[in-house]
Image (cartoon, rainbow, N blue to C red):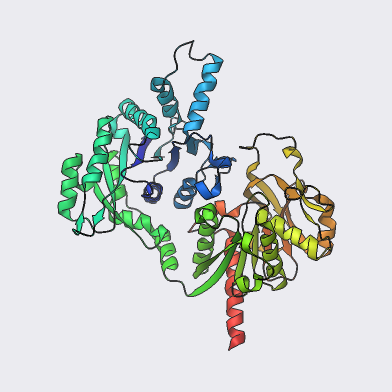
Amino acid sequence: MAVKYVFVTGGVVSGLGKGITAASLGRLLKARGYQVTMQKFDPYINIDPGTMNPIQHGEVFVTDDGTETDLDLGHYERFIDESLDKNSNVTTGKVYWSVLQKERHGDFGGGTVQVIPHITNEIKSRFYRAKSPEENKIAIIEVGGTVGDIESQPFLEAIRQFQLNVGHDNAILIHVTLIPYLKASEELKTKPTQASVKELQGMGIQPDVLVCRSEHELTEDIKEKIALFCNVPVSHVLQNLDVEYLYEAPLAMEREKLADVVLSSLRLENRKPDLSDWEEMVESLRNPNKTVKIAIVGKYTQLHDAYLSVVEALKHGGISCRAKVELDWIDSEELTEKNLDQQLHNVDGILVPGGFGNRGTEGMILAAQYARVHKIPYLGICLGMQMAIVEFARHVLGYEDANSIELNPETKHPVIALMPDQEDIEDIGGTLRLGSYPCILAEGSRSYELFGKKEIHERHRHRYEVNNAFRKELQEKGMNIVGTSPDNHIVEMIEIAGHPFYVGTQAHPEFKSRPNHAHPLFKGFIQAAVDKKISEEQQQK
């Protein structure tokens, strides 16, 4: 079989859910026993999203090998349950950077460097390649943006050339498009889809499968019309209606026979799928027997996508405990001592996520203190752990000016300090401590109990660390250092003694959580919130 390729493009409008369609296909193919890998090609000029504002772009996802990538890769990992790497996210910036470096090096022999063939050849070289001749995989490659965007044209031209090179049986194209509904005339309109497909055809590309996003069921007449005008078999015109829960999407696309059509187009055997674990997970998601309210206290709460993986990981924790997780978004900038109790008194758990910069950190410190004093389950992630330590140093150790040197370089008690290897770094992009690192857990700790093993590996994205000069004092006063790097230099995890659940981690565990395998910390956090709520309800009886 070698490697087969499935390209996924979007038409008419952005935001149709190309990534979810691609990820759903990955899950369906994997359920049939095929090996799957996924890629995202983004048309923006940035090398990666690492320096982008989360409010504009959404979260930066981090892979095991330390690559800062688009948030769609999070969806891919969660759906196909595979760890992706630096090759999984390619931007226009990366492509041009590589070509320009080759030009400066003289690799093109003094010739004129052009979009065709040099840029398109570089793009084609980035399409997934088997690591060995024996490797059999299906590579699903999503092209960001919308067909017709000037930025996407080199990618589409590269796909045209590539398909010609490898043969149509080895590379097919799925086009995700919109079928709008006009309320006034009560009609579904196919013209935008026809126009979008014609644009592709004008570039020499013929879609093999059309996935039509619609608010209403597509009639057979509509499907036949689309098939006729877009030059695809009617069986390859599939509808993609809205689903109540994101993780229902693969099951919905299975009913539409998406995988069947793709395998037929690739001339591959259509095996019987095993989706039982996914169906069980969706069943738990749809039928919770309890509800907990979790406060997310962060600085980017205006755009929930800034914390997308955190939100999904909380859902996964809820699924594992058969609990519905209601989120209370609290802007840490607006959290004060005056409104603290009003905002947090009725929540079952408090989570402070990662972030950078000074804005909103005092509100995070207040939230950490409230959770500690009122015995509310608390999970601090990256900056959330650091602010919990600052809070503890101020109010338990008595160092009123305690802070991170990132936030106050003049503090006399810098409980959070710059990592030695981060000194003198001038560039911002790609220079953090990034990727998967080992952590040794203390036996007998809550974290050790949750993970069930001594050595774990978690993904990181940070520049600052706990100042070791304060470790002894913190421990003596009840903040236990329960996870460290193997050399014992970097504090990775903390817990507060005698608290139902108060855990901080320097890592980003949300990146490794899966809907059918909740991350141990999120599972433990939601279970603690459930226990708190049950205990309170019993007391009220």
Please tell me whether residue 239 is drawn above or below residue 435 in the rendered image: below
Please tell me whether residue 512 is drawn above or below residue 92 in the rendered image: below
Outermost bottom residue: 541
Choose between 49 and 512: the one closer to the eye.
Answer: 49
What percent of the width, then of the height, locates residue 419? Answer: 74, 43
192 relative to 10 in the view: left or right:
left
Asked whether the viewer can see residue 530, the reply is yes
What percent of the width, then of the height, locates residue 11? Answer: 31, 43
What percent of the width, then of the height, locates residue 345? Answer: 62, 74
Q: Quadrant of the N terminus?
A: top left
241 relative to 392 in the view: left or right:
left
Choose between 311 and 387: the one closer to the eye.
Answer: 387
Residue positioned 50% across, 53% down in the render? 305
Q: Quadrant of the C terminus?
A: bottom right
Asked whether the viewer can see residue 452, the reply is no
Choose between 168 and 424: the one closer to the eye.
Answer: 424
Please tell me whether residue 236 is drawn above or below residue 281 in the rendered image: above
What percent of the width, then of the height, locates residue 327? Answer: 53, 66
386 relative to 31 in the view: left or right:
right
